[in-house]
Amino acid sequence: QRAQHEQHGGDEERLCAAGDSEERGLTTAEAKAVPVFGEITLEDMRKNELLAAEVMKRVKEVCAHSKGRYTVTEIADGLTRGTYTIWGVLLPPSDLKAIIVTAANNAVLDVVLAGPVVEDFAPFLPRLYGEARTKRCTRMRLIGPGFFQKHLPEGWRPSVTVYERDLT
């Protein structure tokens, strides 16, 4: 059963500022469109092959940014098993701007993948707070590059520093 999509309002959080429309090559109607955010279920994708193709295209794109942490196959398997939930940011009529993949992990709702562009998904993170509470999570976690911090909603803070070394 498809979760009801909610419209996201507020001039300061619109996907495109009025001055950006020509720069991004958008029509006036597209520039004024308000993004829609909601869960995209496995059932939704089974019923709509075009939606499934678009979602998996975004998953592939965002997995490429994960530097090998996640693969399309792993995400697809997690969706099938029910361990992952996928959320979409849709710019009507049919532009899937961003995806967010989440997984409840003890008392933490992990944002496993999000993207491809931080400005397109970050304003919708607060919509997941209630979902996290429903799953008895007391916090949310997102792994991403340092520049994400300036785009995340209020209350998000760095909690650990990760070090890595390439082995050649």
Image (cartoon, rainbow, N blue to C red):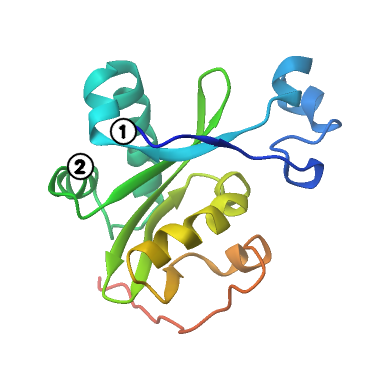
Residue 114 visible? yes
* Quadrant holding the C terminus: bottom left
Pointer 1 with pointer 2, Cβ within 8 A: yes
Mark number, residue 37: none
Indicate the secondary structure of the residue bearing disc 2. helix
Which amino acid, mark 1?
A: Met
* Depth order, front residue of 117/42: 42
Separation (CA) of disc 1 from disc 2: 8 Å
Indicate the secondary structure of the residue bearing disc 1. helix
Task: Identify whether 27 is placed above or below 166.
Answer: above
Read off the residue under disc 2.
76
- The residue at 31%/33% (across/down) is 56
Q: Earlier in the sequence, mark 1 or mark 2?
A: 1
Q: Is residue 34 left or right of residue 129?
A: right
Residue 27 visible? no
Read off the residue under disc 1.
56
- The residue at 84%/30% (across/down) is 18
Which amino acid, mark 2?
A: Ala
- The residue at 73%/39% (across/down) is 14
Q: Position of residue 39 (x, y in %)?
A: 39, 40
- The residue at 31%/24% (across/down) is 53
* Depth order, front residue of 22/52: 52
